[in-house]
Image (cartoon, helix red, strand yellow):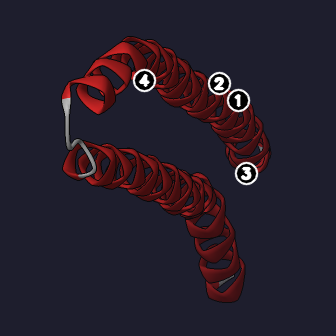
Amino acid sequence: MQENILNAFAEQAKTMYSPMTKFNSLFVENVEKMTEFQLNAIKSYADLSLDQMKKASEVKDADTMRSFTAAQAEVASSLNKKIMDDAKAMSDMAMEFKSQVETLMEEARTSAAATTTTAAKPAGKTKAA
């Protein structure tokens, strides 16, 4: 009898902690993905900045200054597009994470309901006997 109770308790604990374990794994995976994305974005912004500083240092006269300033509008436009694309990618990652968490919570809710139903049946039989 005591062994059955301990086994039931161990099974319920496993069922209860399983969603938390899955959530923690999902969370860590998402943090890794977002961190890698942000590091890559920072690197690309830094590379662009360094490239622009090199081009600025090459300005020697009015003609090179004119061509440098003309190119800045194009650089600003491409930078703006990259920032918008990066923001969309981060938003998409966040929405994917939200969807995965919702799925995980629904699985946990279903599992908890099934465990509660299963646990209640033997108790009901014991009381009836």
Question: Which mark lies nearer to you, 1 or 3?
Answer: 1
Residue under circle 4?
Answer: 75
Identity, as a three-letter code, of the amino acid under mark 4 = Val
Residue named by callout 2: 99
Q: Which amino acid does label 2 sit on?
A: Ser
On residue 103, which mark appears? 1
Q: Where is residue 47 in the image (x, y as percent from the top left)?
A: 40, 55
Q: Dot 1, crowdedness within 10 Å: few (<14), some or many (≥20)?
A: few
Quadrant assignment, res 21: bottom right
Check disc 3 and report its element: helix, strand or loop. Answer: helix
Tell me the quarter of the picture where residue 107 sits. top right
Q: Upstream in the sequence, badge 4 or badge 1?
A: 4
Q: How far apart are marks 4 and 2 (CA)?
A: 36 Å
- In primary-sequence order, the first of circles 4 and 2 is 4
Task: Choose between 55 and 29: the one closer to the eye.
Answer: 55
In the rendered structure, which disc, 2 or 3, sits on the residue that comes first in sequence? 2
Q: Which residue is drawn at 28% across and 50% down?
A: 58
